[in-house]
Image (spheres, helix red, strand yellow):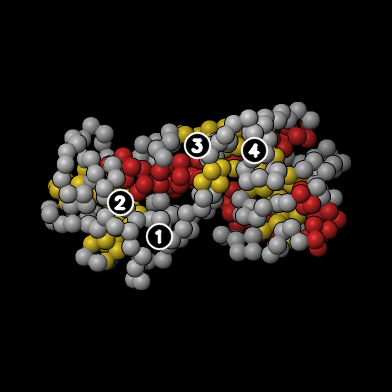
Amino acid sequence: MTASGGLRIALYGDGQWAADTLDRLTEAGHRIVAAVLRQSPSDASLGDAAARLRVPVLQPARINAPDVVRQIAALQPDLGVSVACNQILRAPIREAHALGVINFHAGKLPFYRGRNIINWAIINGETEIGLTGHYVDDGIDTGDIITQVTLPIGWTDGYGDVLRRVVERMPSLVVDTVREIANGTAQRRRQADHPGTYFGGRGEGDEWIDWNASSRTIHNFIRAISEPGPGARTMLDHTPVIVWRAFYDPSWPNYVATPGQVVGRQPGGALVKTGDSTILVQSIEGQTGREQPTWRIGTRLSQHRCVCEDAPPVARPPR
């Protein structure tokens, strides 16, 4: 520990939430002995924060390599803190920290283990998302839980809305959890007592709308991968179209017709038939940028997945 009673911390992470965490831990009196960045960071925020605070930066290709473990051990960290680290920390590097390593996960563990959890939570129609601080063990997001809070997800919230909420709340959760560990008051709750759920990473080809699905499912899907995600995709006359925003009212009538066909026009967009009801497509990526769709009634959108050579590149959403 430092002379002021703070901990010596190695921070493993990426993105703005890790950068804000670095600032907050420093303000709380902890000494950050290293900021360990991804080989290909999502942005420069953590590296910039480390440079500003004169924190040493490591950027290993293989975090568990023996020379990296020795390098970390030589820094004598009390605790490792992971915020969006994209490598699994094996036992040797965890044991280089006197108090172990804790991870902060945007999921309500033991449910929603894995990757791209914010996207998956919205896809599943969740009304809240959990933020969890837990010890790292040999599994993926399976270690003992220390702290957990929940944040709301509204009916029309998109990925960016929920992500901003998480990014704003995560640093204070980290500081609170680290304080409990430093004070010796941290409680541990075993995850092994619950089955939990796991979700794999999302990638190219996962963004295509299935118009045979229910309106609720499509509504959730479109908002779940809206900005800064890749955007939901459909096909119009062999041309890919990004659907950025849509809306569904559960009171709308259910009836049988052709999924993917435009069945109405409203001031707010175009009504498209789904597997059970309709959905109002409000914003698409057109030839001149974001626009409201002007599709004619009777227009058919493809309900099949298709990875097309001329489709815009798919951005991988952060964890």
Task: Work out whether 78 lies above or below 128.
Answer: below
User: Which residue is the site of mark 2?
Assistant: 210
**Would residue 261 appear left or right of 72 to someone viewing this image?**
left
Kindly report which numbered mark, 3 or 2, lies closer to the viewer in this rendering: 2
- What's under tag 4, amino acid-wise? Gly
The answer to which of marks 2 and 4 sits earlier in the sequence is: 4
Mark 4 touching mark 3, by CB under 8 A? no
Camera sees residue 20: no
Residue drawn 64% across and 64% down?
39
Q: CA separation, marks 1 and 2?
A: 12 Å
Q: Which mark is residue 311?
A: none
- What's under tag 2, amino acid-wise? Asp
Task: Work out whether 261 lies above or below 173.
Answer: below
Residue 109: image x %, image y %?
58, 36
Quarter occupied by the N terminus = top right
- What's under tag 1, amino acid-wise? Gly
Kindly report which numbered mark, 4 or 1, lies closer to the viewer in this rendering: 1
Q: Residues within 10 Å of mark 3 (few under 14, many from 20)?
A: many
Mark 1 touching mark 2, by CB under 8 A? no
